[in-house]
Amino acid sequence: METLNASDAKREFGEVILKAQRGPVGINKNGKPVAVMISASAYAEIEQLNQKFLQLAIDQGLEDVKAGRVHDGPETIARLRKLVADAGS
């Protein structure tokens, strides 16, 4: 990934947009990464993957509820306390 400092990215913004169509362009400020510019199509792909992942997680959660693989809050806290206590022994 090509990386530019923020000043250069600002000065060469039109060129950065063109470069982002070919691949991600990193932008650093004070020597540290602060942003990545990507094409609109790459962003749309990322959003689509995020939506698919979220739907899979929701579906798995619903399956767990239907199968009874869930615990309420107090039960979960009690189990965690036991794990911590056992680890300290």
Image (spheres, rainbow, N blue to C red):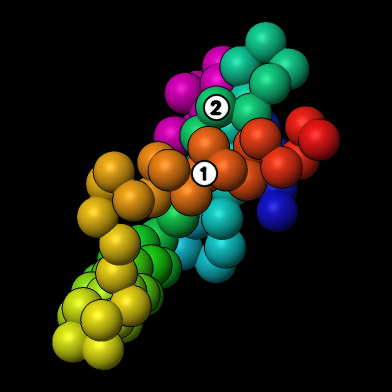
Q: Is residue 75 left or right of residue 58?
A: right
At numbered mark 1, what does the secondary structure look like: helix, strand or loop? helix
Q: Residue furthest right?
A: 89
Image coords of residue 89 (percent x, y): 81, 35
Which residue has dot 1 on it? 80
Residue at 53% x, 37% y is 81
* Amino acid type, mark 1: Leu
User: Is residue 11 shown to the viewer in this render?
Assistant: yes
58 drawn magenta: no
- Label tally: 2
Mark before the other along the chain sequence, 2 or 1: 2
The region drawn magenta spans 6-15
In terms of depth relative to the viewer, which is nearer, 80 or 11? 80
* Residue 55 against residue 6 in the figure, above or below: below
- Badge 1 crowding class, 10 Å Cα cut-off, few under 14, some 14 to 19, many 20 or more, is few
Residue 75: x, y in percent? 34, 51
Q: Which residue is mark 2?
A: 34
Of residue 8 and residue 80, the one placed in the foreground of this image is: 80
Find numbered disc 2 in the image and state the secondary structure of the residue it sits on: strand
Residue 25 percent coordinates (x, y): 58, 47
Q: Using the rendered view, name the quadrant where residue 33 is placed.
A: top right
Q: Is residue 8 magenta?
A: yes
- Packing grade of label 2 (10 A; few <14, some 14-19, many >=20) is few
Judged by depth in the image, the label closer to the viewer, 2 or 1, is 1
Residue drawn at the location 55% of the way across and 66% of the way down: 22
Magenta span: chief secondary structure:
helix
